[in-house]
Amino acid sequence: MKYTATYDMMEAVRNTNEWMGATARAFASNPVWGLAPNPAFKMLSAWGRVTERSFARMVIKPDWGIRTILGDDGRDHLVSTEVVVPRPFGDLVHFRVAGLESRSRKVLIVAPMSGHYATLVRSTVLSLLPDCDVYVTDWHNARDIPVSEGKFDIEDYTLYLVDFLRHLGPDTHVIAICQPAPLALAATAYLAEEDPAAQPKSLILIGGPIDPDAAATDVTDFGRRVTMGQLEQFAIQRVGFKYAGAGRLVYPGLLQLSGFMSMNAERHGKAFTDQIYAEAMGTAGEHDAHNTFYDEYLAVMDMTAEFYLSTVERIFKNGEIARNAFTVAGRRVDIGAVSSVSVMTVEGANDDISAPGQCVAALDLLTGLPEAKKARHLEPGAGHYGIFAGKSWRNNIRPLVLDFMDASAAPEAGSDAAAARPAPRRARRA
């Protein structure tokens, strides 16, 4: 399947469906049909609107959409984004809040590179902005990166995180969500050996596959079932002529999306059927729950082939992070070398992507870290999305994370300042 024609064929199918939706919407919405009212035209127009919007979203990078936040002074403060460290495969982006006093917590959110854009963590960013100075890793769509920029695999990803942390300084708190959790742990360990002064204050790992074998899911079962040869043959394609990355080998976003949808096909089918009926009845809205969710969910990006294949082979199949055998440029990164960074893991009891047990395994690898600097939290009833963006995050997990950051930034126990400081509410210690 590593042919440009295959990639272009998938794009042609998407484009055709978008055109069919637009055609159905325009045809069935013609005022002439008002002369002979028939519910069939309303249904056809509704189907067209939903179909056109859905297929159009697949090639559009969502906007952050964060315009203002409410400050402690009761005023709205304008929010703007700026790239502070540009890189070919991803930038370090800063959310600048105008007129808001400097916030003591500097936070780097490591967004996942797993098929969706960094805007997937929009609500996480929004929830932290009033209390934190927020930075985010904004990964680029591989289809837009010329072949001349070279490769990008999990070792390059790790070194990107190392560079970002060096730029931000040692007073940084890192939140790694899902896919980047093992690589954020590796980057911290890399700094512990190579540049201890650049280590972050704390590392919060949320729903990440540190040890995929700790608890089976559909994702881990797929990793065991498919050989690397099969994966390379059937999942990898070359970017078509339409984009700047023409000729680059990628795991296409459209192919990823088909996999995402098939995992919960019945639920997605019902959601779209209900939305078509809502459109026909006039009860749907531009920013209703369906459109808000699927505008983000359907916006997918290509990953470089080497990043996708190395993730499957080295993280899931070989378990290099779980065995503390991960290497960068031929040199082993010893996770046990981390001795001063406070580390917290967060898992959802109902997470079917990174099941409970996969993320908390990080604490056992941190053999050089005192137990007092480790914490874990298991959120009852929460799924994968809920532990970083849903009600569970807002009401329960976020306060624990902020308290953990404050505790990690406090003076060491035994000092006069520490003795005088009240102990914050914390997650359960490991």
Image: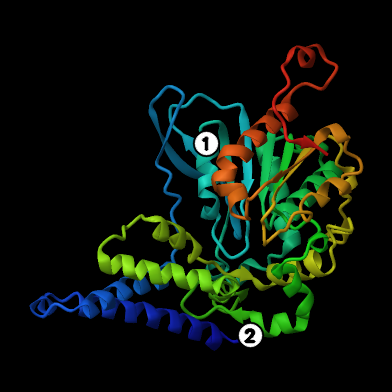
Mark 2–mark 1 Cα distance, whole angstroms, equals 43 Å
Q: Residue furthest left?
A: 35
Tag 1: amino acid? Leu
Q: Which mark is residue 314?
A: none
* Residue beneath the point at 56% across and 61% down: 140
Q: Is residue 92 above or below residue 314?
A: above
Q: Please state the horizontal and vertical placement of residue 316, each as a whole percent of the image.
A: 78, 66
Q: What kind of element bears circle 1?
A: loop
Which one is in front, 152 or 184?
184
> Considering the image in quadrants, where does the N terminus appear?
bottom right
Ranked by sequence position, the earlier of labels 2 and 1 is: 2
Tag 2: amino acid? Lys
Q: Residues within 10 Å of mark 1 (few under 14, many from 20)?
A: many
> Considering the image in quadrants, where does the C terminus appear?
top right
Is residue 209 visible to the viewer in this orientation of the structure?
A: yes
* Residue beneath the point at 72% across and 17% down: 422
Q: What kind of element bears circle 2?
A: loop
Which one is in front, 31 or 133?
31
In screen coordinates, is 137 left or right of 409?
A: left
Q: Please state the horizontal and vertical placement of residue 64, each as a whole percent of the image.
A: 45, 50
What residue did someone put label 1 on? 129
* Residue beneath the point at 56% across and 48% down: 389
Q: Please state the horizontal and vertical placement of residue 86, each as a whole percent of the image.
A: 58, 51
In screen coordinates, is 197 left or right of 371?
A: left
Quadrant of the rendered image containing residue 263: bottom right
Which one is in front, 383 or 261?
383
Q: Which mark is residue 2?
A: 2
Q: Please state the horizontal and vertical placement of residue 60, each as a whole percent of the image.
A: 43, 65
